[in-house]
Image (cartoon, grey):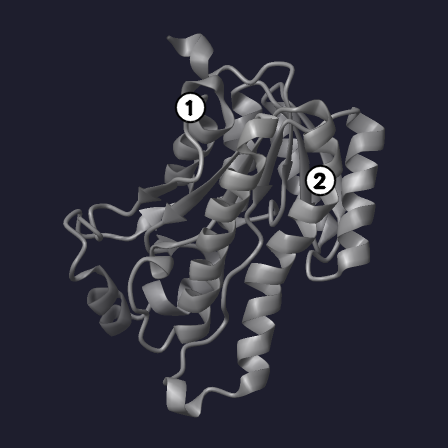
Amino acid sequence: MTSLFDLTGKAALVTGGSRGIGRSIALALAAAGAQVAINGRDATTLEAVRDEIESAGGSALVLPGDVTDRDAVRAVVGAALETIGQLDIVVNNAGGTAFMVPFADLRFEGWGKVMRLNVDSVVHVCQAVAPHLLERGSGSVINVASVGALAGTPALTPYGASKAAVLSLTRSLAKEWGQAGIRVNALCPGWTATDLNRSMWEDERTSRAMTANIPMGRWAKAEEMGGAAVFLASDASSYVTGQAIVVDGGLTA
């Protein structure tokens, strides 16, 4: 049964792989045997993740680049293919939001920034890897969405809308690419404590409000997303596509 989750001989690209959920996914894929190309904007933090993977006996490649820049994304994918020779797993993790604001007070510039980071980046990566995956006739694309895609997100409207767009894109690509042997799924984390949302989970009142309806009564840890990512990347999910795998402590139950 363990072999179903074995990623030996597979190669993965993880965007936003320098910290938080992306880092945890990169570490989990490497631990399962995959060679991992990790992307992010800061080379120093990416190198720290690479060193962590290699010290555990894995193999990793650092590929800095801004995923909101279409040309930069194409350069990152090209470098991954040139160095590794193939991509079997693509994890679109880069994303997030840096603010909470009532919709009536939302500046459109803020809306656009969140959409570029959370939606445009996924489009750029999927278009860049499409020729390679379609030619090979195999692959697993994992788009990191959120429980924010599944319900209303007061004060986080741009974030929720962007992640709903990622979920819709996931389902459309699953139907377009299914006959080509490519699986496309979304991983929907619940409220997960990372550096990006530290202001939320460190604030007692905000944290209490956000966890009040979670049956497990707490924020998720970033590393708790790794197992679901390995499942979606591996043969254990060979007949799973177009799905939203929710890891949320029971929030949406």
Quarter residue 49 falls in = top right
* Location of mark 1 (residue): 239
Regarding mark 2 in the picture, which secondary structure is present there? Answer: helix
- Badge 2 amino acid: Val
Q: Earlier in the sequence, mark 1 or mark 2?
A: 2
- Badge 1 amino acid: Tyr
Measured as percent of width and height from the top left, residue 19 is found at: 55, 49
Residue at (55, 61) in percent of width and height:
118
Residue situated in front as seen by the camera: 124 or 178:
178
Measured as percent of width and height from the top left, residue 17 is found at: 60, 45
41 lies above or below 157: above
Which of the two discs, 1 and 2, sits closer to the camera? Answer: 1
Near mark 2 (Cα within 10 A), the count class, few <14, some 14-19 or many ≥20, is: some
Q: Kindly indicate whether the residue at mark 2 contacts the one at mark 1 (C-beta within 8 angstroms).
A: no
> In the picture provided, is 82 more to the left or to the right than 39?
right
Regarding mark 1 in the picture, which secondary structure is present there? Answer: loop
Residue at (51, 28) in percent of width and height:
233
Mark 1–mark 2 Cα distance, whole angstroms, equals 21 Å
Where residue 194 is drawn, which disc sits there?
none
47 lies above or below 192: above
Residue at (61, 22) in percent of width and height:
34
* Location of mark 2 (residue): 129
Residue situated in front as seen by the camera: 206 or 39:
39
Residue 9 visible in the snapshot: yes
Residue at (46, 34) in percent of width and height:
229
